[in-house]
């Protein structure tokens, strides 16, 4: 873990740039793969953190609300990462379904036997 | 004998949830409703219309509808049984439940803050709720 003890971003863009910079070095492969799917969420969460930081500094929220907000952002960031794992399974399932529907249609068209009625749905 | 074995293998595999549960429209409806009502509260917050604890009363219906719908969605998602010995589909199913749970938890946390201190706009409270609930809905839709 890098040292963030002097980290004091000037604004949302600064925060987001620093954050994605760290992401690239800590989890480059994950970030490259999932940037297009969850990049918007990561940016919005970085924006939320910057807002919380400013609101607390300006006295617009209590320390308690700031603490809650940061916790919620952290939980949602973790949820975003778990979502990318789910994406992998969904993709694998699509590939399997595609493969079996190809096999199923090939058999159906040759023999008239429908082995995979869930995937092969000929029109009557 | 061999032919029967091969045939039964083919009959068992396809259409089967090998990696992920099947798509369920009832589940999508429930999560979409939860998402929609949670969204109404965050819009109210970001417009500055929910800044006081007193404003909670006007939003109570949205909170209860959102939480009830998400709870219903969780029951549907948890009710799905993967084929036996299918660890990956089980994991995917657990992840979907977890995503719905994340949305529900964030709505409940927002509710608590709303009642106690009100929701000031632009302080980073709305994004986690919007994203958590958007992810929950996207997770269910991924199974399409």
Image (cartoon, rainbow, N blue to C red):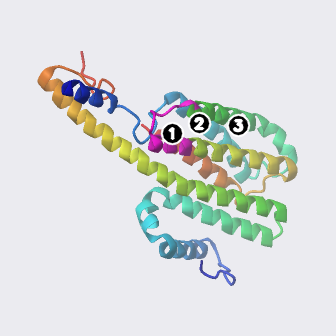
Tag 1 and tag 2, C-beta contact below 8 Å = yes
Residue drawn at the location 56% of the way across and 64% of the way down: A43
Q: Which of the two labelled residues, at mark 1 and mark 2, occupies the earlier sequence position? A: 2
Q: What residue did someone put label 2 on? A: B31
Residue at the location (47% across, 43% down)?
B87
Where does the N terminus of chain B fall, quadrant-wise?
top left
Query: Can the viewer see residue B122?
Result: no
CA distance separating discs 3 and 2: 10 Å
Residue B39 as seen in the image, left or right of residue A87 = right
Q: Position of residue A106 (x, y in %)?
A: 16, 31
Chain under label 2? B
Q: Which residues are magenta?
A: B79-96
Q: Residue at x 19, y 26 (%)?
A: B3
Residue B5 falls in which quadrant of the image?
top left
Please report, as a chain letter, where disc 3 is located.
Answer: B
As drawn, B21 above or below A54: above
Instruction: Please indicate whether residue B45 sits to the left or right of residue A114 in the image.
Output: right
Q: Quadrant of residue B108?
A: top right
* Real-space CA distance between mark 1 and mark 2, rounded to the nearest whole angstrom: 8 Å
Q: Which residue is mark 1?
A: B140
Q: Which is nearer the eye, A13 or B81? A: B81
Q: Position of residue A96 (x, y in %)?
A: 32, 41
**Which residue does the numbered mark 3 point to in the structure image?**
B67
């Amino acid at each position: 873990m890098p040292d963030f003890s002097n980290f004091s971003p000037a604004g949302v863009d600064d925060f987001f740039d620093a954050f994605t910079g760290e992401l690239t070095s800590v989890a480059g492969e994950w970030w490259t793969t999932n940037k297009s799917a969850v990049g918007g969420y990561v940016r919005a969460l970085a924006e939320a953190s910057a807002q919380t930081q400013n609101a607390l500094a300006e006295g617009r929220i209590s320390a308690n609300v700031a603490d809650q907000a940061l916790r919620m952002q952290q939980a949602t960031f973790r949820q975003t990462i778990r979502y990318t794992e789910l994406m992998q399974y969904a993709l694998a399932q699509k590939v399997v379904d595609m493969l079996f529907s190809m096999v199923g249609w090939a058999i159906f068209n040759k023999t008239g036997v429908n082995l995979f009625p869930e995937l092969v749905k000929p029109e009557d | 004998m061999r032919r029967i074995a091969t045939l039964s293998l083919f009959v068992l595999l396809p259409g089967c949830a090998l990696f992920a549960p099947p798509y369920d429209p009832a589940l999508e409806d429930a999560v979409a409703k939860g998402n929609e009502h949670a969204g109404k509260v965050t819009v109210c917050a970001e417009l500055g219309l929910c800044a006081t604890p007193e404003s909670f009363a006007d939003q109570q219906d949205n909170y209860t509808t959102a939480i009830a719908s998400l709870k219903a969605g969780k029951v549907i998602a948890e009710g799905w049984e993967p084929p036996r010995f299918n660890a990956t589909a089980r994991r995917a199913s657990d992840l979907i439940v977890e995503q719905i749970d994340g949305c529900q938890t964030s709505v409940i946390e927002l509710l608590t803050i709303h009642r106690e201190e009100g929701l000031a706009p632009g302080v980073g409270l709305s994004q986690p709720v919007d994203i958590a609930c958007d992810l929950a809905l996207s997770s269910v839709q991924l199974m399409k």
